[in-house]
Image (cartoon, coloured by chain):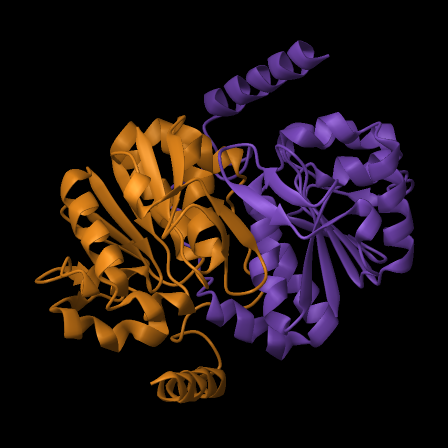
Chain colours: A orange, B purple
């Protein structure tokens, strides 16, 4: 199985590394794909290395698209969007994390699909003909999508179950000691302090207006 | 606040990127530190970029040490061990994830301390004068340690609470949508299928004998 992770300037590192840490453990061949080959800076100081650019990318069985603020710059990038369309059509699975699903949407891949993204971006899904579904991981046909950032780990484990079966997924969950203990009850807008949720919604609107 | 992440060949990417994704969001200056500057391959196909080598690393307020199979090669590396001793003495916090704590132990930093590591390595902690504590995150003075791989996210959030307070930690937890839904009950040796636990213990012994 060959799994490609698409990375681009200002992607969110955990969006990619969460599912990578899970999926790589099935003994897959992992390919980090950049717009072009070389160092790709994430949104907060980590840089990963893309072994190949879009043009040199080998055939992929699984394509994983992380999110991050840099996704916004690619929403009308023909090279990236046609890469997503072509590779998704040829792959067994196309996966996204966080706002990575907006890129799938921009590529036309979410038309008529159930979909999820970061909670702050859920209201953008209908632009792409998608039905927003408030679940941590959403599957629709050969698409599998995770909610914000950390949800990519849960998505990765479910995808391992689909590809290699439950025993393999349980072994990987044990290998990465994934028995999370979130220290606070603030991991979703339903549970977090409403004032915190409001202030993040306002900051995000401000940010989107600022970049528009 | 300046936070350094030590990376080395065959480190486990999620060990580092989990706490990085949390800690970087306090607006910290993040420094990726390699044995020398440049590309550092992890244990399963991801490569991160170290901006500086051990010798050029600036002063750190927080030092984070991930684990991974490559840790074994550094257990008698004087350059790395003296870096850990010196930087830990000067830092406000020293953090480890997974077998990163074995490196702290080899540097003499766990003598008389409560400590944790990956469940498969817990019985090695007494070699370093440490008391193994079966918790997901263990604090002792200015040391904070996480259990295997994914536990670094929980550790990161607790460390943000210590550094910036609970409100900041809750905001980051919401930002990374950390409301985990592990798909199976197999994230710890207590919960997983005992046959799976046994087979992983045996594989790990075999691995250690093979490398000895």
Give the answer, above or below, for where B37 lies relative to A211: above
A69 with respect to B94 (left or right): left
| Count of residue discs | 0
Residue at (63%, 37%) from the top-left corner? B11
Residue B147 at least partly seen: no
Residue at 19% from the left image edge and 63% from the top image edge: A105
Q: On the rendered image, what quadrant is the C terminus of chain A found in?
A: bottom left
* Looking at the image, residue B151 lies above or below residue B81: below
Taking the image as drawn, is residue A201 in sight?
Answer: yes
Q: Position of residue A73 (x, y in %)?
A: 34, 70
Give x and y (percent) for residue A45: 59, 61
**Residue A103 place in picture, x, y as percent:** 26, 62
Residue most extreme to the left = A112
Q: Residue at x 65, y 44 (%)?
A: B38
Residue A125 vertical position relative to residue B95 in the rendered view, above or below: below
Q: Observer-nearest residue: B209 or A209? A: A209
Which corner quadrant holds the N terminus of chain A?
Answer: top left
Is the residue B143 above or below the residue A159 in the image?
A: below
Asked which quadrant contains residue A128, the reply is bottom left
Residue B65 in picture, x, y percent from top left: 72, 46
Q: Would you say A45 lies left or right of A60 here?
A: right
Seen from the viewer's position, the closer of residues B156 and B192 is: B156
């Amino acid at each position: 199985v060959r799994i490609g992770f698409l990375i681009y300037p200002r992607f969110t590192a955990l969006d990619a590394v969460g599912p990578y840490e899970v999926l790589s453990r099935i003994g897959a061949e992992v390919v980090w794909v950049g717009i072009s080959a070389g160092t790709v800076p994430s949104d907060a100081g980590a840089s990963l290395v893309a072994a190949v650019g879009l043009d040199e990318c080998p055939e992929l069985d699984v394509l994983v698209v992380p999110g991050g603020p840099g996704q916004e710059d690619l929403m009308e990038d023909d090279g990236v969007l046609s890469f997503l369309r072509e590779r998704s059509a040829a792959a067994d699975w196309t996966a996204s994390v966080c706002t990575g699903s907006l890129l799938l949407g921009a590529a036309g891949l979410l038309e008529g699909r159930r979909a999820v993204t970061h909670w702050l971006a859920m209201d953008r899904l209908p632009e792409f003909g998608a039905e927003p579904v408030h679940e941590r991981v959403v599957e629709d046909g050969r698409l599998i999508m995770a909610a914000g950032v950390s949800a990519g780990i849960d998505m990765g484990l479910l995808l391992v179950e689909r590809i290699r079966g439950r025993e393999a997924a349980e072994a990987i969950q044990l290998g990465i000691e994934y028995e999370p203990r979130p220290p606070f009850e603030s991991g979703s807008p339903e549970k977090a302090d409403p004032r915190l949720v409001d202030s993040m919604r306002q900051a995000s609107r401000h940010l989107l207006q600022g970049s528009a």
